[in-house]
Amino acid sequence: MINAAVLVLNQNYEPMNVCTVRRAFVLLDRGKAELLENGRGYMHSASLSFPIPSVIRLIYLIRKPRPQPRLSRRDVFVRDNYTCQYCGRQTKDLTLDHVVPRRTAGPHTWENVVAACRECNHRKAGHTPQEAHMRLRREPKAPAPSIYPIFYRYLPAQEEWRKFIAGWERDELLA
């Protein structure tokens, strides 16, 4: 029970991290956090009993940069909704296409990579969309940062966390 997961919220109730019950006890004892949810009962000593925390909130605001999303094939396909960005056909048989080709110093970034069906990718070949007389359906951009990867593996077992994570997560969290 001492190694169970505890949700740590920032002072503004933004989910920050997951720690163990042992670490949560230390933060509570030192006055650095307050208990918000006790979903596990009590831990007893010889003369005292302590609530086992499930969710704690830090007393002071911690400024932490949001995690930047990784650029991967799957994430590009999800961002583009498994749709070719040139012809608009929705399919699972997609390739990655660099809008400005790599051979002309096009970077491998969110703003330069799109999902394309095989036919459109072959038709565009190593040209820019203007040179190939093709038009992008929408401009590629990086997806918004998400805290989803930190918490998704804990959610099935941690029902009391949902009200604190709602609004900060992807739609898949509450589905």
Image (cartoon, grey):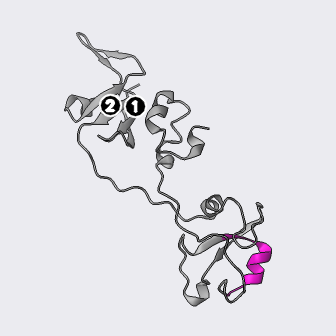
Q: Which residue shows up at 78% across the image and 61% down it?
A: 91
Residue 118, above or below 33: below
Name, please, the residue furthest toward the left. 30
Q: Nearer the viewer, residue 131 or 71?
A: 131
The residue that label 2 is drawn on is 22
Name, please, the residue furthest toward the top. 47
What stretch of residues is rendered in magenta? 115-127
Residue 116, above or below 166: below
Q: Amino acid at mark 2?
A: Arg
In the rendered image, is residue 95 in sight?
Answer: yes
Question: Mark 1: which secondary structure?
Answer: loop
Name, please, the residue furthest toward the right. 119
Q: Which residue shows up at 45% across the image and 60% down it?
A: 68
| Cα–Cα span, label 1 and label 2 | 7 Å
Q: Position of residue 166 (x, y in %)?
A: 48, 38
The residue that label 1 is drawn on is 3
164 in magenta:
no
Q: Which residue shows up at 54% across the image and 87% down it?
A: 105
Residue 59, above or below 85: above
Give the quarter of the image for residue 7. top left
Q: Nearer the viewer, residue 89 or 70?
A: 89
Q: Position of residue 170 (x, y in %)?
A: 54, 47
Structural crowding at the residue carrying mark 1, measured as other residues with C-alpha within 10 Å and reported as few (<14), some (14–19) or many (≥20): few
In the rendered image, is residue 23 in sight?
Answer: no
Q: Position of residue 47 (x, y in %)?
A: 23, 10
